[in-house]
Amino acid sequence: MSKCLVGASIVMFHGDLPYSSKDIIKKLETLNEEHIIGIGGFGTVYKLAMDDGNVFALKRIVKLNEGFDRFFERELEILGSIKHRYLVNLRGYCNSPTSKLLIYDYLPGGSLDEALHGKISSSCIFG
């Protein structure tokens, strides 16, 4: 995953992440296939464990086209400002020339897709 982080910058919302960009990028560079927790139409999701034990979900979205950059950053500014008990908290994002990385709170218990399609109990995700 390291080559997608060349020229990367980290944007954090509300000061929620107590890590420097350097610390986060260092951890992102260690991610590989073993860390994958989901694959969907918009990207691959990795489990990102920090040295202090905090765990996050990282979604990697491959850059789609030139106009995508402005759209992506505008939408994320909006999403980063919304806090709701039924939405997974978006902590920040990493913007690199070749891909976009979204950093979310990690929720154990499986994916929303699994909950919706009966593979796990919905109470694992929704409380």
Image (spheres, rainbow, N blue to C red):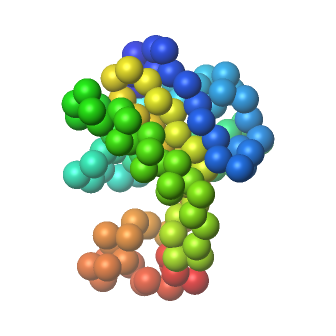
Residue 109 x, y percent position in the rendering? 50, 69
Query: Left or right: where does residue 114 sit relative to residue 29?
Result: left
The quadrant in which residue 118 appears is bottom left
Residue at 33% x, 72% y: name it: 114
In the figure, 89 relative to 24: above or below? Answer: below
Asked whether residue 65 is in view, the answer is yes
In the figure, 47 relative to 121: above or below? Answer: above
In the figure, 26 relative to 125: above or below? Answer: above
**The one of 100 and 43 positioned closer to us in this rendering:** 100
**The one of 104 and 74 positioned closer to us in this rendering:** 74
Image quadrant holding the N terminus, namely top left
Asked whether residue 57 is in view, the answer is no
Query: Left or right: where does residue 64 sit relative to residue 74?
Result: left
Residue 68 x, y percent position in the rendering? 29, 36
Residue at 59% x, 36% y: name it: 11
Residue at 42% x, 50% y: name it: 75
Image quadrant holding the C terminus, namely bottom right
Residue 87 x, y percent position in the rendering? 51, 69
The quadrant in which residue 44 appears is top left
